[in-house]
Amino acid sequence: MKRIELNCFLKGIQVLIIVLFVLTGCDNRQKSIVQQDEYMLGTLIQAKVFNIDKKSAKKSLTRAFQRVQEIEERFSVNIPTSEVSCINENAGIIPISVNEETIKVLEKSIYYAKLSGGAFDPTIGALVNLWGIGTKDAKVPDNQSLKETMDTIGFNNLIINKDKLTAYLTKSGSKLDLGAIVKGYAADEMKKILVEEGIKTAFLNLGGNVLVIGSKVDGSPWRIGVQNPFQRRGNYIGILETKDQAIVSSGNYERYFEQNNKKYHHILDPNTGYPSNNGLVSVTIITSQSIDADALSTSVYVMGLEKGLDLIENLPDTEAILITEMKKVYITSGLKEKFQLTNGEFSYEKR
Ligand code: FAD
Ligand code: MG
C-alpha cells in the first residue's frame, strides 16, 4: 500500500522521470512521431514510434501498453491477486498454478541467480520489504530482524514445475521480488507487439530501461545519453550509439533514503543484507533482450567491478559501462567505437 501511495506522488512529477534519454535534438528528419506516456510498473513508461500513420501508431501503442498492464497484474507484489503475490502468500504451504510466462520469467531469474553466484536473487522480497526503500517508512533494520529476514532468501528454495505449471517457495516467509527483471521483460513484450504491428523505428523507456527498435529514421544509430549518477536526471556522462538494442541501467541514485547522513539505496546485497557497497554507483548493460540487460545490470552492480566485468566480457553480444564513486568509467571491449565519454569530470580507467 505504501509503495502505491508513493506512486501517486511520483505521478505528479513524472515529467522528470527519464534516466537514459534519447538525444534527438532538433533532428527534423524524424517525421511523424507518435508518443504515449503511461505510469505503470511503479514508473513512467515512455514510448515513441516513428514514421507510421497516427491511427496505426495509436492502435499499436494501445496494444503494447495493455500488455504491460497484463504483466503488472501478473507480477506485481503490490497487487494482492497477482500470481507473484499468491506464490508469496503460500510460501512453505503449497505450490501455486501459474501461467507459462511466469514460469519463463522465473526460470530466467534462476538462471541469472546462478550465473551471478547469488548476487541477483529473485527471493529477496522479504529483505526489500524490511528496508522499505522507496516507501515513506524506509529505515535501517535492526540486527535481529535483518538476521531473521536473511534466512528467507535463497533462490534454491524456489521450485518450478514446468509440466504442472506450478511455482513454490519452500521456506515459509520467503518472498519473490521481480523488480530487477520484469521491467526488462515488459520492454521486450512491448517491442514484440510493435514489431508485429509493422513498426520499424521506436524508442521505449521504462523508467531507465531503454529499448530502441531499429535505427533512427534516416538510418543513423540512436544516440543515447548515459545518466550522470551524481547529477539530476538529464545530465549525462557520455553518449552511446546503438541500433536495435536494450540499454538498461542500475544505480544508487534513483531510489534511496538517508539516515544519520548516510545514503541507503535499493540494490541489496543478498550476502550482507545491506545495500550493495562495492564502489560502483552505476552499471549500464547493452544487449539485444531487455530482460537479460535488466537482470545483468542488477547482477553486475552487486558483483562489483572485477567479477562484473569478467562476467560481461564472457557473454556474447553483451556490453557494459560501469561507473565508480571515484568517477572512473570502465567499458567492455565491444564499446570502444560506440561509446563516447563527453563529461570531463569522468575519466576512463583500464583494469
Ligand atoms: P534494478 O536494479 O533493475 O532493480 C532493483 C530492484 O530489484 C529493487 O528495488 C528491489 O525491488 C529488487 N532487488 C534489490 N536487490 C536485488 C538483488 N540483489 N537481486 C534481485 N533483485 C533485487 N515500484 C513502486 O514504487 N510501486 C509499485 O507499485 C511498483 N510496482 C511494480 C510492479 C512490477 C511488476 C515491477 C516489475 C516493478 C514495480 N515497481 C513498483 C518497482 C519499480 O518500477 C522498479 O522495478 C524498481 O524501482 C527497481 O528498478 P530499477 O530499474 O531502478 O533497478
Ligand atoms: Mg535490473
Image (cartoon, helix red, strand yellow):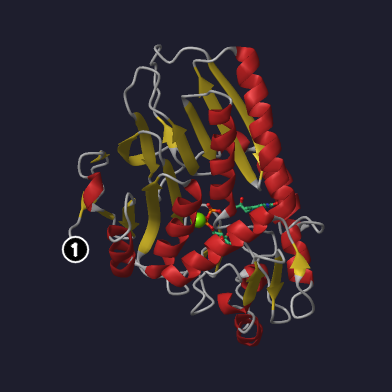
Residue, x 49% and y 72% (percent of image)?
269
Viewer can see residue 12 = no
Residue, x 62% and y 31% (percent of image)?
37
Q: Give above or below for 118 relative to 197.
A: below
Residue, x 39% and y 12% (percent of image)?
29
Residue, x 71% and y 42% (percent of image)?
69
Kind of element beneath mark 1: loop
Q: Which residue is mark 1?
A: 351
Q: Give above or below for 15 relative to 9.
A: above
- In the image, the residue with mark 1 has its CB under 8 Å from the nearest atom of ligand 1: no
Residue 170, x across and y down, in percent: 69, 80
Q: What is the residue that sits farthest to the front in this orientation?
A: 163
**Relative side of 110 to 172, left or right:** left
**Relative side of 14 to 203, left or right:** right
Q: Give above or below for 235 relative to 112.
A: above
Specify the amino acid type for callout 1.
Arg
Viewer-proximal residue, 289 or 298? Answer: 289
Viewer-proximal residue, 12 or 286? Answer: 286
Residue 265, x across and y down, in percent: 52, 62
Image quadrant occupied by the N terminus: bottom right
> How many neighbours does mark 1 have within 10 angstroms: few (below 14), some (14-19), or many (20 or more)?
few
Residue 309, x across and y down, in percent: 29, 62
**Relative side of 184 to 75, left or right:** left
Image quadrant occupied by the C terminus: bottom left
Viewer can see residue 189 = yes
Quadrant of residue 153 within the rendered picture:
bottom right
Viewer-proximal residue, 275 or 258? Answer: 275
Quadrant of residue 278 within the rendered picture:
bottom left
